[in-house]
Image: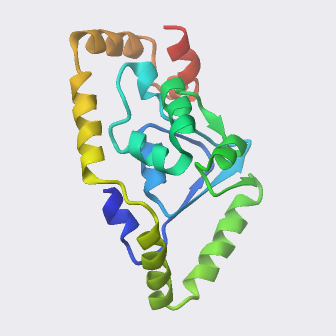
Amino acid sequence: MSDEVRSLPQVTIGKIAGFARGAGNEFLMYLDMRFAAIGRSGQAQPEAVMDILPGGGGTVHMARLLGRARALELILGGELVDAELAERYGLVNRAVPANEIDAFVDRLARRIARLRPEVVAAIKATVESITPKIPHQAYAMENAALFSLFTDDMVASAHKQLAAGVQTREGERDLERILDNL
């Protein structure tokens, strides 16, 4: 999916004003730009704490965006990071005050929308040509590693997590604390 989103001639923009964990955060990393609301957003890859690994491109995209050490910190730690840390690490373009994020992203999107589509496509293609692509082998390796972790121990861990309520609305809001206490 990453290549399909990255190769769109249009610009893709994500606005985060809530929690994006796992697949939601992975999808955001596919986008051209991401903006996070200060005090209202959080991003995480909690899979390691859940006895698996991010299988939707989470490992490879985070490494590309943040670098090896920061990717390992966030993936292995499973920490929910706020907008400011996400900006500092390069997970988002910019952390914006929550009461300004809608207007900011709207202005940016409108400014880009006024450009000729050929200009946008040419700029994206040029930037893409010098930005390292993620080799398809990296996705294959990620998937193989993920599937190798589907063991009886992982299933038992998943049952504990479900019993603790991780799939509930309240559990989603407090996921990291619940996982830390299992």
- Left or right of 135, for residue 102: right
- Left or right of 151, for residue 11: right
The residue closer to the viewer here, 128 or 181, is 128
Instruction: Name the residue located 41 percent from the left edge and 20 percent from the top edge.
Output: 50
Residue 135 point in image, percent of width and height = 30, 54
The residue closer to the viewer here, 91 or 133, is 133
Instruction: Name the residue located 71 percent from the left edge and 67 percent from the top edge.
Output: 104
Q: Is residue 167 visible?
A: no
The residue closer to the viewer here, 59 or 13, is 59
Residue 174 point in image, percent of width and height = 58, 23
| Count of marks, rendered view | 0
Q: Is residue 143 visible?
A: yes
Instruction: Name the residue located 54 percent from the left edge and 8 percent from the top edge.
Output: 181
Instruction: Name the residue located 22 percent from the left edge and 33 percent from the top edge.
Output: 144
Q: Quadrant of residue 114?
A: bottom right
The residue closer to the viewer here, 64 or 20, is 64
Residue 149 point in image, percent of width and height = 26, 21
As displayed, is residue 109 above or below residue 72? below
As displayed, is residue 51 above or below residue 136? above
As displayed, is residue 51 above or below residue 99? above
